[in-house]
Amino acid sequence: MRPEEYLAIVLRRWWVVLLAGLVAAAVAFFYSSTMPPTYQVSVRLMAVAQPPDYWLDLYAKNRLASFQDLIRNGDFVASALARAGLSADPGQVLGSLQLGRNQDSNVIQLVVTDTDPARAARVANALADAFVAQTMAENQRILEQFRDPFGQRIQGTVTVLKLDTASPPSVPVGPRTRLNTIGGLVLGLAFGILVTFGIEYFEDVLRTARETTRALGLPVLSEIRLARDRRSRRVEETMPKLVVLEEPLSAAAESYRTLRASVLGREAAGASCRTILVCGIGRNSRDAASVAANLAAALAIAGERTLLVDADLRQPSLHTLLASSPSTGLAEALLSSEERPIPSRPTPVSELALIPAGTLPAGTNPADLLARAHSLARLAQLRERADRVVLHTTPLPECGEALVLSRLADGVLLVVRSGRTSRSIAQRAKEQLERVGASLIGVVLLTG
């Protein structure tokens, strides 16, 4: 995916990112506000070798590194606190204790954090004093046996000095409410972005042309934006509307002209495209009906004698394009034993004729009717009556009529509704068409 696609995913659910950031910032703020203030004091301890000597100084550094483990010992801490007359919990002191030392330095920094500034200072001084006392005794005992690499006894002393005397601090070091709030906001925003990508990954819908092409492996021949106002959209979803005729200067009409150019361009490239099957995906067949009607009208306006066939015998809708409701249609013609041509009706577009679906008798399955050899033969004869035949049928994969009619079509157009069409269902519909050898032209993406 390109960077702008990632950005589009985040912007599509910007409110998730913002909400996660605000919630995390609020939690961090209230948590920090309820925490008691903490104070921090430090004492520096330094090991000094006398007289100055390389080996003696090296001994001092090494012993300082090993002796600092004393401060992390629970028994040592408990003894130091008892000697200073403090009732602090040794475990709590160990949890708040920090030690810092540079490997090339003779200095240890002892840091104590507590909610009571006076107690923090007393604990730091008690630990420092106990450390000085114990390390002095240990150093004197070990120095008596210390030799340099040549076997000579080192003469001198190593003294541990307390460089600072801790005093109660007046300014707390925590909690850092502002910093914690900003940190919570940043972490919340990052979490919100991860959530948006997770939703996008698990959400099984197609949204953009790039997503559709990647999921189906088919080109998006045209993106058609539906009406924005609710009233027009409701009308558009219940009955087809000839946008290319009623609103010829609209963006949707231009999109249908683009679709027409793509279809005719395919034939110019050497592939036959006289019969086109328009098939929706999912439950709603109105979208595909609108695309079929407007594509047929666009072809007719371009001078092509076009025949539009409503082969959706379950939920027919193209008859609404006629001035009056027809009494018969495709269903009656296919059920009839007569060999007369299937009757068509004129439409508001001069070069466009419509064969409505008609009424199917109760108990008759549309897929069984269309699959009859007699029905397929009669439908195949429609190619001789027009330059272009546009078939509209029930959507895949729930109904199988499209699989039957695809045998008559030179190409199949799939209609996808952005934000509604399931990715997995669209892939299953494509696989069904490929299994019966259908020639897939591409996809029409409806947005808005």
Image: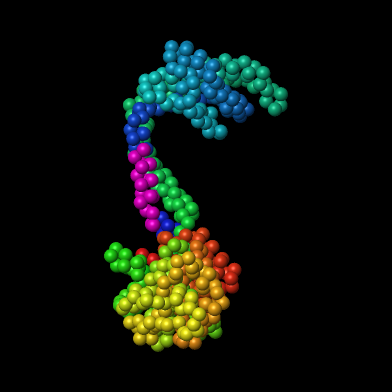
Q: Of 274 and 15, which appears nearest the observer?
A: 274
Q: Tell which of 406 and 40 is nearer to you.
A: 406
Q: Where does residue 321 sit, x and y in percent of width and height? A: 34, 76
Q: Which residues are magenta?
A: 11-27
Q: Is residue 183 visible?
A: yes
Give yes or no for residue 237 being in the magenta stretch.
no
Which residue corresponds to the image point at 41% horizontal and 48% vertical from the top-left? 192
Residue 14 forms part of the magenta stretch: yes
Instruction: Give the x, y percent position of residue 148.
Output: 67, 25
Q: Quadrant of the C terminus?
A: bottom left
In the picture, residue 118 is in which quadrant?
Answer: top left
Q: Residue at x 51, y 69 (%)?
A: 367
Q: How is the image coloured?
A: rainbow
268 or 159, nearer to the observer = 268
At horizontal 28% and vertical 65% (from top left) the residue drawn is 231
The residue lying furthest to the front in this view is 337
Residues 118 and 212: in front is 212
Quadrant for residue 235, please give it: bottom left
Going 56% across and 24% down the picture, which residue do you hit? 69
The quadrant where residue 24 appears: top left
